[in-house]
Image (cartoon, rainbow, N blue to C red):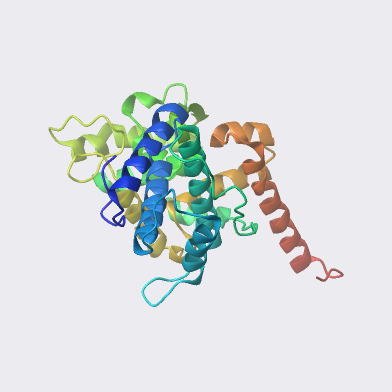
C-alpha cells in the first residue's frame, strides 16, 4: 500500500510487521481499502509512540499501550483529544495486530489481551426531512453538464443509500436503467443489487445522454460519475459537490455524503420497509448495525408526539 502523506513515520522493524499484517487483512480477510488505510495510520502512529520511548514490539507491555491510548485521549497543544469512536478503532487495530503477531510466531505474549476500549455511546445519525431532501435535490439547476451530473449523483445516493466510496466506484456497466437496479460494491468488495427509484432513473438517463458525454469529451473513463476533466470523480470531489449544494439550500451544518445514506434508511423504515430488506439494501453484514435506524425512527416519532400532543410532556 502507498504511504499516506499524513501518516507518521515508524521504525523499520515495526513498519515491516505492519505491512505484513495489512497484506494479511487485504488478501485473506478482504477488508476494504478505507479500513486498511485507517489501520495503517493507527499502527504507524503507535510505532512512532514506541520509537519516542525507545521500545520495541517485544518490549511493549500492557501499561505502554494504555499510556499510548491515554495520550491520544488527553490530546495536547498540537493535537485535539481523539474521539471515543476513533479511540475504539485504534484499540481494535492494536488487538488485531498483536493477535496476528502471535499467530505468526513473531511474539510470545499479547499485551492487548486485557485491553478495554472506551465505553460505547449510541450516537444517532443526523437525517434530512422530506422537505430538506426536496430542497437539496432540486438545487442543481440548468442543463449544463455539471448540473445534470449533480442531479443524477444526488438522486442516486438518496435513492439507493450508497456510501461515498460506492457512488464514486460505480461503473457504467453496474447500472441497468431498463430494470431499474444497480450493483453496488460495498465493504470487503461485496456486491449487492439495489433498486433505483423512477426519479433517479430519469436523472441518470439525462446524465448519460448529455451530461456525461459533455464532461467526458474524448476520454474513455469507465466510471459512471466523472469530473469536469472527464476523469473519475474522487471522494473529495463528491464531498465538494454535496457540500456546495447543501450550502446553497441552508443545510451545510447537517450535511455530508453519508447523511443521504442515513436519510435513505430512515425514510424507508418510516415508509414500512422491513429491517431485513433494509439490511440487504444497505449492505450491512450485521442486522444490529441496521437496527440503529429503528431507534432513530422511534426518537423522531417521540419528538413529534411530545411537541404536538396537548397533554403530553417530557
Give the residue furthest to the right: 311
Q: Residue 232 placed where, x, y %? A: 25, 39
Q: Which residue sits at x=65%, y=48%? A: 292
Give the residue furthest to the left: 218
* Of 264 and 68, the residue lying toward us: 68
Quadrant of the frame with the C terminus: bottom right
Q: Residue 263 placed where, x, y %? A: 55, 49
Q: Which residue sits at x=48%, y=47%? A: 93
Would you say 274 lies left or right of 88 here? Answer: right
Q: Which residue sits at x=47%, y=35%? A: 187
* Of 216 and 6, the residue lying toward us: 6
Say if residue 165 shows up in the picture: yes
Report the label total.
Answer: 0
Q: Residue 165 placed where, x, y %? A: 39, 41
Q: Which residue sits at x=39%, y=78%? A: 77
Q: Residue 20 placed where, x, y %? A: 36, 36
Say if residue 139 shows up in the picture: no
Vertical comparison of 90 with 69: above or below:
above
Give the residue furthest to the bottom: 77
Quadrant of the frame with the N terminus: top left
* Of 215 and 63, the residue lying toward us: 63
Would you say 109 lies left or right of 140 here? Answer: right
* Of 127 and 138, the residue lying toward us: 127
Vertical comparison of 138 with 82: above or below:
above
Would you say 274 lies left or right of 191 here? Answer: right
Would you say 288 lies left or right of 206 here? Answer: right
Amino acid at each position: 500500500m502507498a504511504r499516506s502523506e499524513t501518516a507518521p513515520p515508524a521504525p523499520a522493524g515495526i513498519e515491516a510487521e505492519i505491512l505484513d499484517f495489512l497484506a494479511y487483512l487485504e488478501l485473506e480477510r478482504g477488508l476494504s481499502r478505507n479500513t486498511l488505510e485507517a489501520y495503517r495510520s493507527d499502527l504507524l502512529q503507535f510505532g512512532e509512540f514506541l520509537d519516542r520511548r525507545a521500545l520495541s514490539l517485544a518490549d511493549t507491555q500492557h501499561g505502554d499501550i494504555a499510556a499510548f491510548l491515554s495520550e491520544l485521549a488527553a490530546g495536547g497543544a498540537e493535537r485535539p483529544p481523539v474521539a471515543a469512536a476513533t479511540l475504539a478503532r485504534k484499540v481494535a487495530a492494536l488487538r488485531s495486530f498483536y493477535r496476528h503477531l502471535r499467530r505468526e510466531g513473531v511474539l510470545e505474549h499479547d499485551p492487548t489481551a486485557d485491553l478495554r476500549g472506551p465505553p460505547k455511546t449510541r450516537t444517532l445519525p443526523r437525517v434530512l426531512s422530506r422537505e430538506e431532501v426536496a430542497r437539496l435535490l432540486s438545487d442543481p439547476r440548468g442543463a449544463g453538464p455539471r448540473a445534470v451530473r449533480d442531479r443524477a449523483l444526488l438522486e442516486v445516493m438518496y435513492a439507493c443509500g450508497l456510501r461515498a466510496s460506492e457512488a464514486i466506484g460505480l461503473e457504467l456497466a453496474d447500472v441497468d436503467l431498463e430494470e431499474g437496479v444497480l450493483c453496488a460494491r460495498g465493504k470487503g468488495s461485496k456486491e449487492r443489487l439495489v433498486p433505483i427509484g423512477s426519479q433517479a432513473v430519469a436523472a441518470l438517463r439525462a446524465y448519460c445522454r448529455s451530461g456525461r458525454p459533455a464532461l467526458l469529451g474524448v476520454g474513455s473513463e469507465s466510471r459512471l460519475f466523472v469530473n469536469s476533466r472527464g476523469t473519475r470523480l474522487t471522494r473529495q470531489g463528491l464531498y465538494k459537490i454535496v457540500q456546495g449544494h447543501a450550502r446553497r439550500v441552508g443545510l451545510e451544518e447537517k450535511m455530508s455524503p453519508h447523511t443521504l445514506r442515513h436519510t435513505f434508511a430512515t425514510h424507508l423504515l418510516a415508509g414500512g420497509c422491513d429491517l431485513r430488506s433494509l439490511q440487504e439494501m444497505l449492505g450491512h453484514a450485521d442486522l444490529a448495525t441496521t437496527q440503529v435506524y429503528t431507534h432513530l425512527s422511534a426518537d423522531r416519532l417521540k419528538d413529534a408526539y411530545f411537541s404536538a400532543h396537548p397533554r403530553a410532556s417530557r
